[in-house]
Amino acid sequence: MLTILNHPLLDVKMTSLRDKTTPPHSFRRILHEVAGLMSASVFSHLTTQEMSVETPLEHTKGFCLPEPLPCLVSILRAGNGLTDAFSAILPEIPIGHLGLQRNPDTHHAEAYYEKLPNRIADRQIILVDPMLATGGSAIMAADRLKAHGARDILFACLVASPEGVRAVQDAHDDIPIITAAVDRELDENFYILPGLGDAGDRIYNTV
């Protein structure tokens, strides 16, 4: 249920994301490029249905996404970076948002906002957050989605820690995880090492 993507261009672009001297405007652009490279694996989990299509020469078999369409759910605020990139490839699907933040004292996730597409229980859901550190935000997000009846969830991130992967798998062993990298460990403040810093701050230039 864990997929660590292996691609030479991912290695190159992830190195640029890790580099502390990469400016925010370049960080955002490279993040979009990384998401583009990840998209084939992420979207490979989507279900399609057969349809008939007329080419300029004849009728043939084709495929479409069934209704209700799958959706993206962004864990705010950093999740919007990946969400924007994935939605550029599949712009017709709806986007939901879950506002979760880590308490600076307890390091536990706390919810502050929720807006989801209708019929969420019937949709395939791609849940996104660039960083999977302790796993607290991903677990809380999955808990909230399942409380609404969601049954088909995939989690996509840029960088994960081994501790975060284990936590999500222990809490939700039915949710596949797709990531560009699994790093070494968490530090004493629960940041991923070597990581790439705070993805939200680097995306939005709020360091």
Image (cartoon, rainbow, N blue to C red):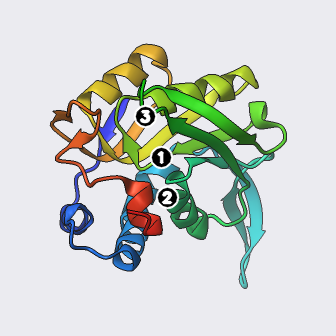
Quadrant where the image shows the C terminus: bottom left
> Front-most of 70 and 189?
189
Of tags 3 and 2, which is closer to the observer?
3
Q: CA distance from mark 1 to mark 3?
A: 18 Å
> Residue 129 location in percent, x, y?
47, 46
In-image side of 5 versus 108 (left or right): left
Residue position marked by numbered label 2 in the rendering: 82
Q: Quick one: SS at disc 2?
A: helix
Disc 2 or 1, which lies upstream in sequence?
A: 2
Q: CA distance from mark 2 to mark 1?
A: 7 Å
- Asked if residue 75 is positioned above or below residue 80 in the image, the reply reads above
In-image side of 173 versus 56 (left or right): left
Please name the residue shown 29% across and 33% down the image. 190
Image mark for residue 104? 3
> Residue 34 location in percent, x, y?
36, 64
Please name the residue shown 59% across and 48% down the image. 74
In-image side of 142 versus 181 (left or right): right
> Residue 160 location in percent, x, y?
31, 39
Q: Quick one: SS at disc 3?
A: loop
Q: How many marks?
A: 3
- Residue 110's image quarter? top right
Image mark for residue 129? 1
> Residue 86 location in percent, x, y?
54, 61
